[in-house]
Image (tube, rainbow, N blue to C red):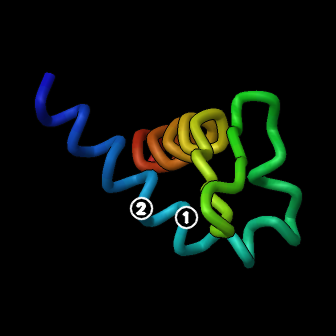
Amino acid sequence: MFRWVLTIFIGLIVFSALLPWLEKLGVGRLPGDVSFSLFGKRIFLPFASTILLSTVIFLVARFL
C-alpha cells in the first residue's frame, strides 16, 4: 500500500512539472483535475490526468 501511495505522489510531482507542455496537448483539463488559487498562487492537482497517464504507461510497459 505504501508503495502505491509513494508512486502516486511522485507521479503528481512529475506531472505538475510537465504540466505546461502537457496542457498544449489537452491533458490536464479532465473532469477529475482540480485547480484553484490560494494566496495568489495557482495550485493544480491533476488526479484524473495522473491516473490516465499511469494507465497508458502501464499498458505500454506491459506490451514491451
Name the foreground residue: 47 vs 34. 34
Q: Is residue 18 above or below residue 35?
A: below
Give the residue displayed 81% in from the left and 66% down from the top: 23
In the image, 44 versus 17, the foreground residue is 44
| Rendered location of residue 6, percent (x, y) | 21, 43
**Residue visible at 87% across and 71% down in the picture:** 24
Q: Name the residue beneath numbered marker 2.
A: 13
Residue at screen point 86% across, 65% down = 25
- Residue 14: horizontal and vertical position, in percent? 44, 66
| Vertical placement of residue 22 versus 62, above or below | below
Determine the residue located farthest toward the left in the rendered image. Answer: 2
In the picture, measured across the screen, residue 51 lies left or right of residue 49, that is left
Determine which of the numbered discs, if any, sits on residue 40 in the image.
none
* Dot 2 crowding, Cα within 10 Å, few <14, some 14–19, many 20+: some
What type is the residue that disc 2 sits on? Ile
Alpha carbon distance from label 2 to label 1: 5 Å
Left or right: where 47 falls relative to 6: right
Q: Secondary structure at mark 2?
A: helix
Circle 1: is it few (<14), some (14-19), or many (20+) Cα within 10 Å? some
Q: Relative to 44, is 54 above or below? A: above
Q: Residue at x 41, y 40 (%)?
A: 62
Name the residue carrying label 1.
16
Furthest residue toward top: 1
**Mark 2 touching mark 1, by CB under 8 A?**
yes
Type of amino acid under label 1: Ser
Q: Quadrant of the N terminus?
A: top left
Task: Farthest residue to the front: give it.
Answer: 39
